[in-house]
Image (cartoon, rainbow, N blue to C red):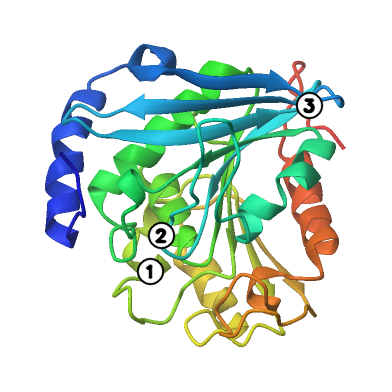
Amino acid sequence: MYGKLSRIGFAASVAMGLTVLASIPVHARASDRAEGIREERTDKHGAGTQVFNLQLQGGGSQRVLYTSPARQRATLVMLPGGSGDVGIESDGDVRHGDNFVVRTTQDWIDRGFAVLIPDALDHDNLRGLRSSPEYASLVSDLVAAAHDRADGPVFLLGTSQGSIAAMNGAAHAREGSIAGVVLTESVSIMGGSHETVFDADPARVRIPALVVANRSDQCDVAPPGEAPHILASMTHSPDKRIIYVEGGEQKSKKACGSLTPHGYYGIEQTVVGEIANWLLAHVEDTSGNRTK
């Protein structure tokens, strides 16, 4: 039904499905809305991987890759940049794994975080769609799926174009469903996608927020100098911070590519470590105290 979706067609088609999904309580099992787990396995380190299709009422579905460590501290709903087409295979392999939030999966697992990565709907281009109300509802459904699979807090983490989706999801999240949002190398200058993080209702974000900016980023739609403006736009966030990093290598031809300073290529461990420290400071243990 979805085919090659146009900007308007995507909104209309997803709205059909999410009108029904919006009526499902947040505690409803995501597995009740899935076509079934295609692959489930555990590696030698104890990490478990699932691939499942989260079904939408209109005939389409959202393929999701979920990987969890043996001992989990929190879940990260990763929102990739670019077109959003990750290419998740039924066995858990990924065809397009260069994006920062995809290629660092094992780094997060090693630090005790489960990772949930959605693919693009029917491999369509998500540019220009991530700030829509329909996509906010889809992010909410991904969060519900994350809660269904494990106890503990859930965070949104977006990069580049994916930061628009993360901002949108955080702005319209059900109260208590998301512990915080991380925005990395966010698209803040209008470009070919015709949307930025400022179009995603930042003033409605009421959860802790972290903005990460690489001073070496040369991507014209994600300048590091915009980081303070992004932070300031989240006027109702109770706890917000900027982390600046510097460095990286350029392997991609374009400055906005994944294997560049824009995608933290070559400095992944530094960036993941900085973000992980912030996340863990916002993970509450069972006694209500924050872990150190």
Left or right of residue 90: residue 58: left
For badge 2, the amino acid type reads Pro
Label 2: which secondary element: helix
**Residue pointed to by mark 1:** 198
Q: Are marks 2 and 1 in contact (CB under 8 Å)?
A: yes
Label 1: which secondary element: helix
Is the residue 122 above or below the residue 4 in the image?
Answer: above
Between 196 and 69, the residue placed more toward the observer is: 69
Left or right of residue 209: residue 284: right
Residue 203 placement: quadrant: bottom left
Q: Is residue 27 visible?
A: no
Between 132 and 286, the residue placed more toward the observer is: 132
Total labels drawn: 3
Q: Residue 183: horizontal and vertical position, in percent?
A: 57, 60
Residue at 31% across, 55% down: 124
Label 3: which secondary element: loop
Left or right of residue 87: residue 112: right
Q: Earlier in the sequence, mark 1 or mark 3?
A: 1
Q: Residue 14: horizontal and vertical position, in percent?
A: 20, 41
Position of the N terminus, as image quadrant, is top left
Q: Residue 30: horizontal and vertical position, in percent?
A: 41, 18
**Residue pointed to by mark 2:** 202
Dot 2: within a 10 Å radius of its alpha carbon, few (fewer than 14), some, or many (20 or more) residues? many
For badge 3, the amino acid type reads Asn
**Residue pointed to by mark 3:** 289
Which of label 2 and label 3 is nearer to you?
Answer: 2
